[in-house]
Amino acid sequence: MLIFKLAIILLASKIAGDLSVKLGQPSVLGKLLIGIILGPAVLGLITNTEVLNEISEIGVILLMFLAGLETDVKEFKRTGKASSYVGVLGIILPMFLGYLAGITMSLSTFESIFLGLLLSATSVSISVAALKEMGQLKTKEGATILGAAVIDDVLVIIALAFVMSLSGGDVNLTTVILKKFAFFAIAIALGWKVVPWVLNRFVKLQVSETVISAALIICFLFATFADKAGIAPIIGAYIAGVSVSVTKYQQEVTEKVETIAYSIFVPVFFTLIGVSVNFTGITDKIWTIVILSIIAILSKLVGGALGAKLAGFNTKSSLGIGSAMVSRGEVALIIASSGIQNHLLSEELFTVMVIVVLITTIATPPLMKKFFSQSKNELAS
């Protein structure tokens, strides 16, 4: 029964999050781990369903919308150079090491390149939650991480289209690039001119909660637009949040979206990541999982940190930025699914990569806590 499952998820995620904080870790780590315990891997109390997946998707979209709402646009503009360095170097190193791992595993050239691309993906939805908890979202580091995530997403998707076009997939590279360019051009134009106008008109309607309703409509439409353009919906939601953040409604929308998101949708998103884990049949692949997980974590951590260091951040802040890029999340899973469809990833390796993605997701919050706490201590001293 859906209602019972929601009650269990909300109760368990809140308690697990509280325990995680008491142990000195971000609450999101506890929410991820409790999903594994509740799911088929341990207790089997919660199973993934289509309805829960839809609720989870709304959760991640609202999470990134909130990240956009809390973005300092002036700071975001100033970190363009740093975001570019972090985004690009955070792709090059995982791509290279992933390719070498594929060759070592006797994969074909295209399969090895695809594995490198898969390891290059980044999803900062988990990082955003950790940044909010640590009060780092509105900092220069936070703006750099969010900007790098957008750059990473676009470059990886374009590279993926290029690989698929060469490997015989029915993909037109020129069309893909034009769609991406058109999305950002139109989304920015709409955010700049249309979003404020829509909000100002919508609030005049003689019904309740017009501001929050208008903001959510904008968020969901931008996420849908991004999805249709072949870009992760969370990028569209983030741009929508930034668009609303420069209006006079920013504070009201932020407070009300936080209430809606964190009361039900976001806990379901975090918990379902853990619920999706299934350890059946992975015993024979344990060393493959360990090696690919080490490559996945270190390549993003080092690549992102090098980019931040080149942009002028100190060592601890650079490592904090690098650690925030470690989680592969839903972006990597989407790419992995396309690999299955285009015969660039075997079913066996797909299962391995799902576990690797989960490990990177679980590793991200404690890594961020470690490096950002150290960075704060350095500034204090």
Image (cartoon, helix red, strand yellow):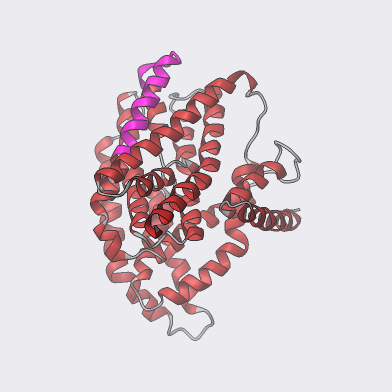
Tell me what residue is drawn at x 71 percent, y 38 percent. 40
Q: Quadrant of residue 39?
A: top right
Tell me what residue is drawn at x 37 percent, y 74 percent. 198
Magenta segment boundaries in residue numbering: 89-111
Taking depth in this image into account, of 120 and 312 the one nearest to the observer is: 312
Q: Is residue 188 left or right of residue 329?
A: left
**Secondary structure mostly taken by the magenta-highlighted segment of the chain:** helix
Look at the image and say whether residue 99 sits in the magenta stretch: yes
Q: Quadrant of the C terminus?
A: bottom left
Q: Residue furthest front?
A: 381
Q: Residue 211 in the image: x percent, y percent?
A: 46, 77
Residue 154 visible in the shown view: no
Q: Is residue 78 above or below residue 200?
A: above
Q: Quadrant of residue 176?
A: top left
Q: Is residue 65 left or right of residue 276?
A: left
Q: Is residue 39 above or below residue 219?
A: above
